[in-house]
Image (spheres, rainbow, N blue to C red):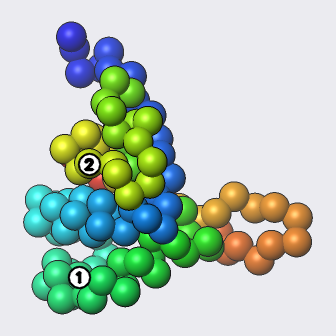
């Protein structure tokens, strides 16, 4: 199967996915530090509460791309595995809805 033939699902990181977010983000920073605005050394020292807060931030959406055939695509938050991830989208503003004050910003894509 050609890599372009893969079916991919985007999953929004939920509060229980904080460890997955941490794992993928640190891996991505090691691989392509220039793709992010924060140095790896800074993020490696962040406490678990930092990652929990980041995963549950309602104003910034973070998505992971997973192979649709992956069991993680159907797993509940907190049960998703980094091995099944093929990408990370960070810094995406939440979708604008009437009565919200979500700011605009650029999304960054990191493909593993």
**CB atoms at circles 2 and 1 under 8 Å apart?**
no
Q: For the residues marked 2 and 1, what is the alpha-carbon distance in whole angstroms? A: 20 Å
User: Can residue 37 be seen at all in this image of the molecule?
Assistant: yes
26, above or below 66, in the image: below
Instruction: Judge left or right: residue 86 versus residue 101.
Output: left
Dot 1 falls on a residue whose secondary structure is helix
**Residue at the image position 33 percent from the left and 49 percent from the top:** 80
The residue identified by callout 2 is: 81
Percent across and percent down for residue 53 are 46, 81
Q: Which mark sits nearer the N-terminus, 2 or 1?
A: 1
Instruction: Judge left or right: residue 1 versus residue 76.
Output: left
**Residue at the image position 25 percent from the left and 40 percent from the top:** 84
Determine the image quadrant of residue 104.
Answer: bottom right
Determine the image quadrant of residue 37.
Answer: bottom left
**Residue at the image position 61 percent from the left and 71 percent from the top:** 58
Percent across and percent down for residue 66 are 35, 38
Dot 2 falls on a residue whose secondary structure is loop
**Direction top: furthest residue:** 1
The residue identified by callout 1 is: 43
User: Can residue 62 be seen at all in this image of the molecule?
Assistant: no
Percent across and percent down for residue 47 are 27, 89
Question: Which of the two residues, 26 or 93, is positioned nearer the viewer here?
Answer: 26
Q: How many other residues sit within 10 Å of disc 1, few (<14), some (14-19) or many (≥20)?
A: some
């Amino acid at each position: 199967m050609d890599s372009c033939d893969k079916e991919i699902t985007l999953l929004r990181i939920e509060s229980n996915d904080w460890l997955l977010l941490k794992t993928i983000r640190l891996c991505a920073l090691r691989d392509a530090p220039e793709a992010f605005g924060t140095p790896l050394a800074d993020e490696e020292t962040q406490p678990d509460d930092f990652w929990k807060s980041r995963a549950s931030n309602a104003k910034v959406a973070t998505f992971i791309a997973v192979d649709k055939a992956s069991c993680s695509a159907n797993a509940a938050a907190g049960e998703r595995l980094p091995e099944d991830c093929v990408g990370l989208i960070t810094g995406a503003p939440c979708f604008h809805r009437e009565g919200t004050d979500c700011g605009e910003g650029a999304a960054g894509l990191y493909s593993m």
